[in-house]
Image (cartoon, rainbow, N blue to C red):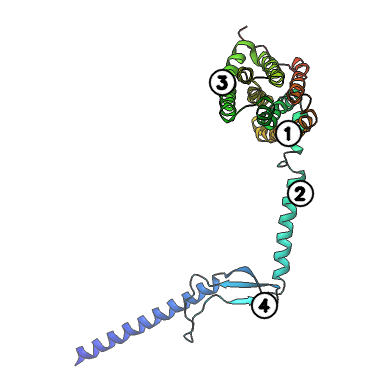
Amino acid sequence: QEQEQEQEKASDSECDDQDSMGGSSQQSTAEATERTPRVTFALSEPSEDGDVETREIGKRGEHEDDSSDDGTSSRPILRNSGDGDQRATLLSGASIAAFARDLAIGPSNPVLGLSILTRSRNLALCAAILLLSLYVHWTAVTISGQYTVMDIGFNKTEIMHKFVIGGISATVFTVVIGALLQRWLGVKGAIFAGIILSATQSILFGLSNSVMLVYVVVGFTASPMLGPMLCGYATTQVSPREQGRLQGALSVIYSLAGGLGSFASAKIYQKCSDSFPGMPFVVAGVIQAAALPFGLFLRVPSSGLL
């Protein structure tokens, strides 16, 4: 009997210890729950009357259970916020204003980035030569098809041959001949050679009156090689951190040349199509030749073999 009484006392003491441990565990859980911060964020959604209603969504902490004491689920609670829509409007308005300000006067504006081309004389001269040479390119793109078909009498097969010859010639001049000219004559000499070839080719194209003569002239399409040559040289005139700004400024030059060249050449062709339809190409050749004085003032160290 004494042994049974001792066993009962031991079991009672174990139960008391378990109860005390359970109470302390619940107390620590409750304290951790109180210390856990609630995370809220704003949710904007349209109401029935068309206004935007902003409500704060409460997110439960890590130590909160999905069920409350009364057995209901404690899901995130939506609470109306009177000034939430005003804060959201102010935030979006400030973001839009900052973006517009950066686009208008910030470094991401390529038009304002044109100022980098005036930093040195070499950059300004490169930009001028590039603009004039691109005028020749866009004149050919805009007028050459109609000129060869309507005024010289190309058929479908001949116009296809003309574009194939021109494409191959432009690729060879840009990739092969341009690199060889820079190696033999240096950058400045290669730019001079490109300007002379481009101006001559454009004038002869405007004076052509037969299919074979057009084929021969198109085989010397040298104007496309000036663009990579000038842009490559311009990259050596700025620091590595300003390369993106320089490329943005050069892209503006390309866009300006495309708009001006297409518009001007179309107007010239419209006025001279009855008397001298090749006038746009002659004018483009003269404009290209006007880039020669700019090339004279380029300060480029002589690095050619000749």
Label 4 near label 2: C-beta < 8 Å?
no
Q: CA distance from mark 1 to mark 3?
A: 25 Å
Label 4 near label 3: C-beta < 8 Å?
no
Residue 122 visible somewhere in the drawing: no
Where 275 falls versus 28 (above or below)?
Answer: above
Q: Mark 2 is on which residue type?
A: Arg
Residue where numbered disc 4 is placed: 48
Q: Mark 3 is on which residue type?
A: Val
Q: Write down the quadrant of residue 3 in the picture.
A: bottom left
Residue where numbered disc 2 is placed: 101
Residue 37 image offset from top left, x and y in percent = 57, 69
Q: Nearer the viewer, mark 4 or mark 1?
A: 1
Q: Nearer the viewer, mark 2 or mark 1?
A: 1
Q: CA distance from mark 2 to mark 4?
A: 35 Å
Residue where numbered disc 1 is placed: 262
| Residue nearest the observer in this picture, 3 or 153 | 153
| Residue nearest the observer in this picture, 171 or 54 | 171
Q: Write down the quadrant of residue 55 in the picture.
A: bottom right
Residue 306 image offset from top left, x and y in percent = 63, 6
- SS assignment at label 2: helix
State left or right for residue 77 relative to residue 112.
Answer: left
